[in-house]
Image: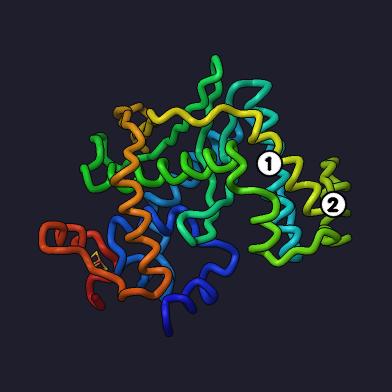
Amino acid sequence: MSNGDLIQKYRPNGVRITDLSAQLWCEKQLEFGLEKGRIETREMNKGTERHKELHEEIATLVKIEPKIKADYVALRLHNIQVGLERLIVEGMTRELPVFGKINSLFVIGIVDELNLKDNDLVILDTKTRKKDTMPSEAQKRTTRFQLMLYNKLIQEFVCEKFSTKDLMSFYGFKKSDNISDEFKKQTTDIGIRIEPNIKKLADKSFELFQTLPIPEKIMNIRYEFQLNKKLIGVDEFSFESRSFQKECNFCEEFWLGKRKAIPVGIDNNWKCNYCEFNNIC
Ligand code: SF4
């Protein structure tokens, strides 16, 4: 199977931003994960729980079940709209979905936190840690890349480089495509008003992005101790265009099938001690 088929097989609705950041950790591990699935560790579950908790601090979460592709995309667009309205009025939002292009790849992701104050738009992330210590440089690098990817996607929205047209064309939607009647009923039943037409909904959501400033180059990652939520430290760093572009090119090559997945090199083989695929790699 060529890697072009990998996108079709595993990520037909968009490569995830977390795929790209995981790829910087170990590309071979990402490939195994796609083929065999990842084992959810206790640490991962704790991280997911904490994100949900932080999201619930600012929003009431409701469960709805999209039925068709248009419903899934509409739900993300609706959450963008609600999240950006909150950001503009209250100065902060969490768990904001994003779409976009990284080189030739169509990608999707969820920005952990955005703050808007005095016309400064700042991207933040909270990572939880099993140990009460800051992560290694290798771990910091992958998370920094993740935030730089979000930064880039938001820049493209703000400058209208990514538009409704790009979204419609990637998913193959027509102007007249709407959410399903069943999804519409579900949202109405729980009191959510959602624009049924995908194009109109995308236009509305993306227009809100265009009212925002370009995100600040300086970003912050808060590292929190899982046991008691104590802040371990903050990694403050700046968007580095040259290394970022190099890393995007590296990631793209794999997804386009230009080369096979690369395992970690000799300097990084300590990562294999923590890898669930160690015995088959
Ligand atoms: S064992 Fe090492 S090289 Fe192989 S997938 Fe895991 S981390 Fe990567």
Q: Name the residue rendered at 30%, 69% in the picture.
A: 28
Q: Name the residue rendered at 53%, 67% in the picture.
A: 11
Residue 228 visible to the viewer: no
| Residue that lies at the very extreme toward the left in this rendered image | 266
User: Relative to residue 62, is residue 183 depicted above or below?
Assistant: below
Residue wearing tag 1: 206
Q: Name the residue rendered at 71%, 67% in the picture.
A: 172
How many labels sit on residues? Answer: 2
Q: Nearer the viewer, mark 2 or mark 1?
A: 1
Q: Name the residue rendered at 84%, 42% in the picture.
A: 193
Residue 152 visible to the viewer: yes
Q: 239 or 232: nearer the eye?
A: 239
- Name the disc covering residue 196, or none: 2
58 left or right, relative to 182: left
Which quadrant of the structure image shows residue 26?
A: bottom left
3D distance between C-alphas at marks 2 and 1:
16 Å
The spot of residue 128 in percent (x, y) is: 38, 39
Q: Earlier in the sequence, mark 2 or mark 1?
A: 2
138 left or right, relative to 213: left
Quadrant housing the N terminus? bottom left
Image quarter for ligand 1: bottom left
Amino acid at the residue labelled 1: Phe
Which quadrant of the structure image shows residue 22?
A: bottom left
Amino acid at the residue labelled 2: Pro
